[in-house]
Amino acid sequence: MFKTSLAIGSAGLVVAAGLAVVQVQADAPCIENSNTGAMGVKVTDIHDQRIEGARVALTHQSTGNQFNTQLTGKDGTTFFTDLKPGPYVVVATHPDAGEGKRLAKVLRYRKTRVSVVVRP
């Protein structure tokens, strides 16, 4: 008979089932065990000031699939996980700062970092 237990501590989530113990770091994206990648996006204006509240949209260039739009935080960044590898169009818009667009490539098991400059 197997015993399963669940514990949440400062190191993250620990699940024990029988002889196997799996620990998931709660504050880090887990992409090592999937066929996907991740992308961090930083949005700045033409003066290199980070933009809070910019809408960031991703579109997979090869398939045309769009992902949920996310807003940047106080540090001007946002993070997307579970992305299919390949080329993406990254569009950032802000009502006061303007719009910017970049192409970026997501690689399997990797975290891609992209900076987008918005212009009026």
Image: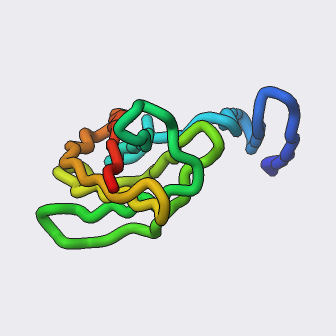
Q: Which residue is drawn at 84% across and 46% down?
A: 6
Indicate the quadrant where residue 110 lies: top left
Question: If the image is split into quadrants, where does the C terminus sit?
Answer: bottom left
Res 22 seen here: no
27 above or below 86? above
Query: Which quadrant of the figure has residue 29?
Result: top right
The residue positioned 22% from the left and 44% from the top of the image is 104
The residue lying at 46 percent from left, 66 percent from top is: 69
Q: In this view, does 78 lie above or below 111?
A: below
Is residue 57 or residue 18 the one in the foreground? 57
Q: Is residue 37 visible?
A: yes
Provide residue 27's location: percent of width, then percent of height.
67, 36
- Please give the name of the residue rendered at 55% of the width and 51% of the height, measured from the top-left corner: 72
In the orientation shown, which residue stands out farthest toward the left?
Answer: 62
22 vs 38, left or right, is right
**Which residue is farthest top?**
11
Please provide percent x and percent y for residue 79: 50, 46
- Is residue 112 left or right of 23 when viewed as pictured? left
